Amino acid sequence: MPTAVLTDHERTAVQAYLRLLHTVRAAFDGPPGGRPPMVPPSALAEVEQALERAGLAGNEQAFFRLLHDWSQEIG
């Protein structure tokens, strides 16, 4: 399998997305019947800015390909 070499901006976008994903999972893992899950607006803004800087905004297919390739490398 070819190894994806991410640019700094792409790596930042992937890492920001993964932090957002963990935040959402933690929100849903709260107590049942508790408050509805909330994701801080700053987390969403971080991901949006990182995706734009990497040229991936509106290009989900390319982004998820990078995410998949990178996650295969780290674990």
Image (spheres, helix red, strand yellow):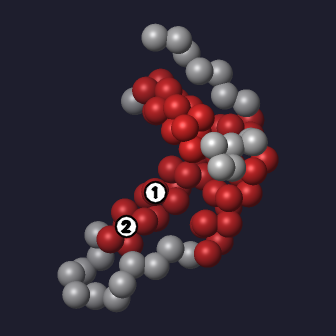
Disc 1 is placed on an element classified as: helix
Q: Is residue 74 visible?
A: no
Residue 33 position within the rendered picture, expressed as x and y whole percent measured from the top left: 22, 87
- Quadrant of residue 29 in the image? bottom left
Q: CA distance from mark 2 to mark 1?
A: 9 Å
What residue is shown at x 60% (from left), y 52% (from top)?
16
Residue 74 position within the rendered picture, expressed as x and y whole percent measured from the top left: 46, 29
Answer whether labels 2 and 1 touch (C-beta < 8 Å). Answer: no
- Quadrant of residue 37 in the image? bottom left
Residue 54 position within the rendered picture, expressed as x and y whole percent measured from the top left: 74, 42
- Is residue 5 rendered to the left or right of residue 8? left
Q: Which mark is residue 26?
A: 2
Disc 2 is placed on an element classified as: helix
- Is residue 72 rendered to the left or right of residue 32? right
- Is residue 60 rendered to the left or right of residue 50? left
What residue is shown at x 65% (from left), y 21% (from top)?
5
Residue labelled with disc 1: 21
Which mark lies nearer to you, 2 or 1?
Answer: 1
Placement of the C terminus among the 4 image quadrants:
top left
What residue is shown at x 24% (from left), y 80% (from top)?
31
Q: Is residue 65 visible?
A: yes
5 w.r.t. 61: above or below: above
Count of labels shown? 2
What residue is shown at x 21% (from left), y 81% (from top)?
32
